[in-house]
Each structure stands twice: as structure tokens, then as C-alpha cells.
Amino acid sequence: MDELLARAVQGVDPGTPGAFWHIFLNLLNMVPWVAMFWWNLLFVVVGALLGWWRGRLLEGIVWSWVLGPIGWLVVLLKARPVPRAEPPPLPR
């Protein structure tokens, strides 16, 4: 933990007015953004497949984009859409 904190405050004087933002940007630069993008893309693709299988394609994409693999559970645990029980109206 000390190493991460040292990397976050590297080159920052804590007494300056913009120190918070500089430390915040240092922390954001340590995040593996490319790996996170590809993992999120994988989650969305699997969510789209599960949503298509359950008849809720858009919900599968949205839930997996927002919640990742937990969104898969949301799509799987929701009931399938029930087809209309009444027939369509007859032409006049």
C-alpha cells in the first residue's frame, strides 16, 4: 500500500491548491484501461447472447454493460416475456 501511495503522490506537493487533482490523475494513470475495455466488451457480448436467448436482447446488453457479469444473472433470473394470450383482432 505504501508503494501505491508513493506512486500516487510522486511529483506532487500536497500543499498546492491543485494537489488533489494531480494525485487523482496519477491514480487514474495506474488503472489498466485497455484490459478493462476488453473485459467489458466480453461482458456485453455474453450479455447480448444471453439476452437474445431469453428474448430480451436490449436488456441483456444494458444490464451486462452496467453490472458486468452480475447483469447476466439479472437477465437469467427474469422471466421470459409471455406471448399475448388473446388472438389478434380480425379484419373488418
Image: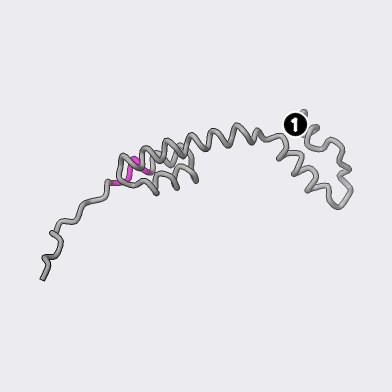
Residue 44 location, x and y as percent?
A: 46, 39
Badge 1 local density, few (<14 within 10 Å), some, or many (20+)?
few
Between residues 54 and 1, which one lies in front from this camera angle?
54
Residue ID for mark 1: 4
Q: Residue at (71%, 34%) from the top-left corner?
A: 30
Residue 81 vs residue 50: left or right?
left
- Helix, strand or loop at label 1? It is helix
Residue 38 location, x and y as percent?
A: 55, 33
Q: Residue at (60%, 31%) from the top-left corner?
A: 35
Q: Give the tally of numbered discs.
A: 1
Q: What type is the residue that disc 1 sits on?
A: Leu
Q: Residue at (26%, 50%) from the top-left corner?
A: 81
The answer to which image quadrant residue 11 occupies is: top right
Compared to 85, does 70 lie above or below? above
Q: Which residues are magenta?
A: 75-79
Outermost residue, front side: 92
